[in-house]
């Protein structure tokens, strides 16, 4: 048993680490995001103690996507449960190669738009792309990506819509996703999303250009 007493709505993700493998999960009952590590070579039931990534402030929700950088940094995109206008709805969580966590809230809820379904992707040069759905109303949304800049207000530098259905269809495109592995040196850097009609959309972040 890695964790217990979580809500039926909670979720987990298995993530690669230099030292082995980790499981990161949300715990909405206790308002925590947690991770446990299994080190390579240890018995199957031998797990490290729970790492509490963050506790309190309604920081947990059932949206998690993670990717491991070449230098051993683990990048994790999550949603919180704050749901208040003018407050951040998403949290970028960064685990250093030494196992230290940093949490950076972003993506404020406004009267005109809400954000959800965070995801991320890594370029070969170390650039971190962070994306999410933006709901403009009940029938229309788009997928926005930007480059992570932890020194910038709002975490993202030059966010822009990379997937936006034509205004005639007014499709609610949602659920962006990308690879857990680093994008290749050559070839496309594809991210995907879909809509309620079953259409699948793609965008090539290589062609977007790093600001």
Image (cartoon, rainbow, N blue to C red):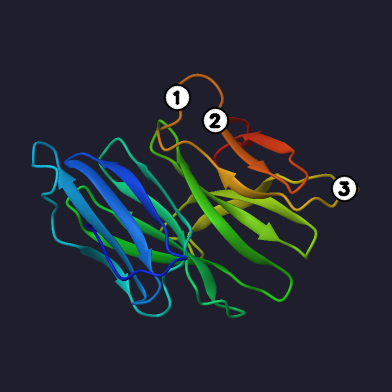
Write down the residue under mark 2: 189
Q: Report which quarter residue 200 is drawn in.
A: top right
Who comes first in sequence, dot 2 or dot 3? 3
Write down the residue under mark 3: 169
Whether tag 2 and tag 1 are in contact, CB under 8 A, the answer is yes
Q: Residue furthest top?
A: 186
Does 179 sit left or right of 172 as displayed? left
In the depicted structure, whether residue 87 falls above or below residue 62: below
Task: Give x and y (percent) for residue 135.
Answer: 70, 61
Mark 2 residue crowding within 10 angstroms, few (<14) / some (14–19) / many (20+): many
Camera-side residue of 40 and 105: 40
Who comes first in sequence, dot 3 or dot 1? 3
Real-space Cα separation, disc 2 to disc 1, in angstroms: 7 Å
Q: Is residue 129 visible?
A: no
Who comes first in sequence, dot 2 or dot 1? 1
Q: Which mark is drawn over residue 22?
A: none
- Residue occupying the point 35% across, 79% down: 56
Write down the residue under mark 1: 184
Task: Give x and y (percent) for residue 42.
Answer: 8, 41
Dot 3 lies on which element? loop
- Which quadrant holds the N terminus? bottom left
* Foreground tag (3 vs 1): 3
Real-space Cα separation, disc 3 to disc 1, in angstroms: 33 Å
Real-space Cα separation, disc 2 to disc 3, in angstroms: 26 Å
């Amino acid at each position: 048993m890695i964790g217990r007493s979580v809500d039926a709505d909670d979720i987990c993700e298995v993530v690669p680490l230099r030292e082995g493998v980790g499981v990161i999960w949300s715990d909405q009952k206790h308002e925590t995001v947690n991770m446990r590590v299994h080190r390579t070579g240890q018995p199957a039931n031998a797990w490290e103690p729970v790492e509490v990534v963050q506790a309190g402030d309604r920081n947990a929700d059932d949206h998690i996507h993670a990717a491991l950088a070449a230098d051993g940094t683990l990048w994790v995109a999550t949603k919180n449960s704050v749901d208040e206008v003018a407050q951040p709805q998403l949290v970028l969580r960064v685990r250093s190669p030494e196992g230290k966590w940093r949490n950076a809230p972003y993506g404020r809820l406004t009267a005109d738009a809400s954000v959800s379904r965070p995801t991320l992707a890594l370029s070969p040069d170390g650039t971190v792309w962070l994306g999410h759905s933006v709901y403009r109303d009940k029938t229309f949304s788009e997928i926005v990506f930007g480059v992570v800049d932890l020194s910038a207000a709002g975490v993202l530098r030059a966010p822009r819509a990379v997937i936006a259905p034509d205004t005639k269809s007014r499709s609610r495109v949602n659920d962006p996703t990308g690879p857990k592995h680093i994008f290749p040196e050559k070839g496309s850097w594809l991210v995907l999303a879909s809509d309620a009609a079953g259409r699948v959309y793609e965008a090539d972040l290589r062609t977007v250009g790093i600001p």
